[in-house]
Image (tube, rainbow, N blue to C red):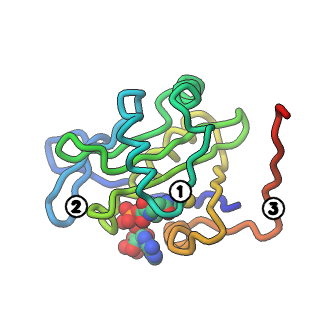
Amino acid sequence: MIRAPRSRTLHAGPAGLDPSRLSSYTTGMQYVLRPFTMNDYDAAVALWKTADGIGLSEADSRGNIARYLSVNPGMSHVAEADGVIVGAVLCGTDGRRGFLHHLAVAPAHRRTGMGRALVDKCLESLAAAGMRKCHIFVLADNTAGQRFWSKIGWEERTTLKVMSRDVVR
Ligand SMILES: CC(C)(COP(=O)(O)OP(=O)(O)OC[C@H]1O[C@@H](n2cnc3c(N)ncnc32)[C@H](O)[C@@H]1OP(=O)(O)O)[C@@H](O)C(=O)NCCC(=O)NCCS
């Protein structure tokens, strides 16, 4: 498990526009970061299915994601460029800690700061909800993903292991 950085960078938008909603690449291309709604579900699943390092399961069914968004309102985010969902992340709390799941950026938009900006948005919403720490689960063979998280300040928890079991047998 990896925990959140103590500091974060917020991306400013172009002059005259709400910087909390607009981000820009160094190339000048713009994208909007906004809360994830169920209208984004199909596009987000399509993005996640094509992203190495993300494993989907029955936990990601339409009904489960609808419930997740309703119990964690406004915390999950998407990045939209020219009306297309090019980044997505789920964010929520268990009431005492924050968790991020399924961060993905479309290949053509990677290395532009979009992944970091999505994470920053989630950390803002977690801080507003009173959370002091956030955890993520990274697949053990997702070395590129681990390099990304380390680069933006997250620390690997070498003393923890994830254990799971089915609730209903
Ligand atoms: C991981 C992922 C979300 C990163 O998105 P991104 O938009 O490319 O990341 P950013 O551009 O915000 O990068 C932030 C920093 O991390 C670095 N970084 C990004 N990907 C990296 C990689 N694979 N290896 C090393 N560093 C990386 C960037 O260079 C940047 O560093 P800088 O600020 O010093 O320039 C994207 O590669 C992706 O969707 N991967 C597939 C899905 C996945 O693995 N998700 C994580 C699941 S736990």
Closest to the camera, between mark 1 and mark 2, is 1
Task: Tell me the kind of residue under disc 1.
Answer: Ile
2 up-or-down from 122: above or below:
below
Instruction: State the residue at coordinates (83%, 67%).
Output: 159
Instruction: State the residue at coordinates (39%, 46%).
Output: 46
Task: Tell me the kind of residue under disc 2.
Answer: Tyr
Is residue 116 in sight in this rendering? no
N-term-proximal mark, 1 vs 2:
2
* Circle 3 residue: 161
Instruction: Give the image location of residue 103, x and y in percent.
Output: 48, 53
Report crowding for label 1: few under 14, some 14 to 19, many 20 or more residues within 10 A (C-alpha). Answer: some
Asked whether mark 2 and ligand 1 are closer than 8 Å, the reply comes as no
Find residue 8 and name its label: none
Quadrant where the N terminus is found in the figure: bottom right
Instruction: State the residue at coordinates (47%, 46%).
Output: 89
In this rendering, position of residue 122 left or right of residue 105? right
Q: Secondary structure at mark 1?
A: loop
Quadrant where the C terminus is found in the figure: top right
Instruction: Give the image location of residue 125, x and y in percent.
Output: 51, 38
Find residue 25 and name its label: 2
- Image mark count: 3
As measured in the structure, the alpha-carbon distance from the residue carrying label 1 to the one carrying label 2 is: 25 Å
State yes or no: discs 1 and 3 in contact (Cβ < 8 Å).
no
N-term-proximal mark, 2 vs 3:
2
Asked whether mark 1 and ligand 1 are closer than 8 Å, the reply comes as yes
N-term-proximal mark, 1 vs 3:
1
As measured in the structure, the alpha-carbon distance from the residue carrying label 2 to the one carrying label 3 is: 37 Å
In this rendering, position of residue 44 left or right of residue 158? left
